[in-house]
Image (cartoon, helix red, strand yellow):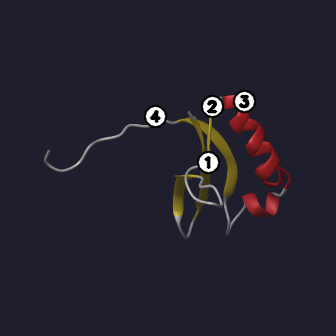
Amino acid sequence: MWGVLQRQKNRLDGKQEYLMLRREGGFLLFDTRQQARDEINARFGYIRDRPDLRKEPHGWKMPIPVRVKITTAKGGKP
């Protein structure tokens, strides 16, 4: 699976990175890297054209697609 990593770096908060969530809940995940890239360009492409958002105080960067490995674990005693 592929996720979308949101990034920002500014003096107030420092460097922050987190996986994007869907509006209805859950992580924003895709089957292919290309699907993730297409969604990034559709939803966040405006950041590329907005130097005011990339500079202080915001420090936004374009999100990037990242490989996500999903594992599950059974908790507690059997």
Mark 4 to mark 2: distance in Å?
Answer: 12 Å
Residue that lies at the very extreme toward the right in this rendered image: 49
* C-alpha distance separating marks 1 and 2: 11 Å
Q: Which residue is tagged 1?
A: 28
**First along the sequence among labels 4 and 1:** 1
C-alpha gap between disc 3 and disc 4: 17 Å
Q: Position of residue 66 (x, y in %)?
A: 57, 36
Task: Determine which residue is flagged by label 3.
Answer: 34
Mark found first going from the N terminus, 3 or 1:
1
Q: Is mark 1 on a helix, strand or loop?
A: loop
Amino acid beneath label 2 = Asp
Give the residue drawn at x 68%, y 51%: 61
Q: Is mark 3 on a helix, strand or loop?
A: helix
Of pointers 4 and 2, the one earlier in the residue sequence: 2
Secondary-structure class at tag 4: loop
Q: Does the residue at mark 2 contact the one at mark 3 (Cβ under 8 Å)?
A: no
Q: Name the residue under label 2.
A: 31
Q: Do the residues labelled 4 and 2 touch (CB within 8 Å)?
A: no
Which amino acid type is shown beneath numbered disc 3? Gln
Q: Nearer the viewer, mark 4 or mark 2?
A: 2
* Disc ID at residue 69: 4
Task: Measure how far apart labels 3 and 1 are at the Cα level.
Answer: 14 Å
User: Which dot, 2 or 3, sits closer to the camera?
Assistant: 2
Q: Is residue 41 above or below residue 26?
A: above
- Which image quadrant: the C terminus? top left
